Image (spheres, rainbow, N blue to C red):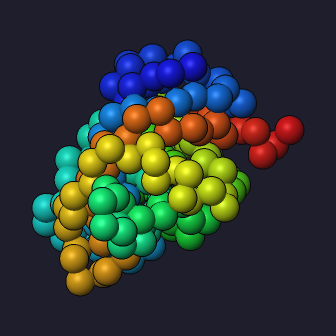
Amino acid sequence: MKITKDELIKNINNVQAGDKIYLSGVIYTARDAAHKRIVAALNSGGETPFELNGAAIYYCGPSPARPGSVIGACGPTTSARMDAFTPRILAEGVKILIGKGARSKEVAEAIKKNKAVYLIATGGVAALLSKTVKKANLAAFKDLGPEAVYKLEVENMPLTVAVDANGKNIFNR
């Protein structure tokens, strides 16, 4: 089903683990180092690089864009690398997580508790996924290079619901 980020959040209880979706809207990239800084900012009362409440985070470190392209290859990284930070991020209102691979039991419980969803992208198709990015802008942490936070506008990014807001998890089947 084609769905915007805002529609997905509004209907978050209606998507089910295993559903295939084509997501459109604004998402932010953030990997390990960016997560560490975001959680440090939260713990010290500092500002985060984007509004977390209602946000979608894509675990991705895009490569530089070729001339004439919006972005370089932008495939998902292994989501478990963010597990230590994810419950804290979800508690701040993040509603959509995008990556690849299974999550810890603690993260799956935090997804259910915070009425969020975890979506997975197919690994190994980073060049194809880059074609769904219509705009890309550096948002924060430029010094992190490819792990900097980017604001992406995506159109019809192909994803699968891996953990839904009711706690169903395709990795537990």
Residue 39 pos. (x, y %): 32, 66
Q: Is residue 135 above or below residue 9?
A: below
In the depicted view, which residue is nearer to us: 46 or 31?
Answer: 31
In the depicted view, which residue is nearer to us: 61 or 114?
Answer: 61
> In the picture, residue 56 is in which quadrant?
top left
Q: Is residue 2 above or below residue 57?
A: above
Q: Is residue 153 above or below residue 72?
A: above
In the picture, the quarter occupied by the N terminus is top right
At x 41%, y 65%, the residue is: 72
In the picture, the quarter occupied by the C terminus is top right
At x 42%, y 72%, the residue is: 63
Residue 114 showing in the rendered view: no
At x 31%, y 80%, the residue is: 145
> In the picture, residue 65 is in which quadrant?
bottom left
Q: Is residue 60 above or below residue 8?
A: below
Residue 65 showing in the rendered view: yes
Residue 135 pos. (x, y %): 27, 48
**Is residue 148 found left or right of 98 in the rendered image?**
left
Residue 74 pos. (x, y %): 47, 61
Q: How many marks?
A: 0
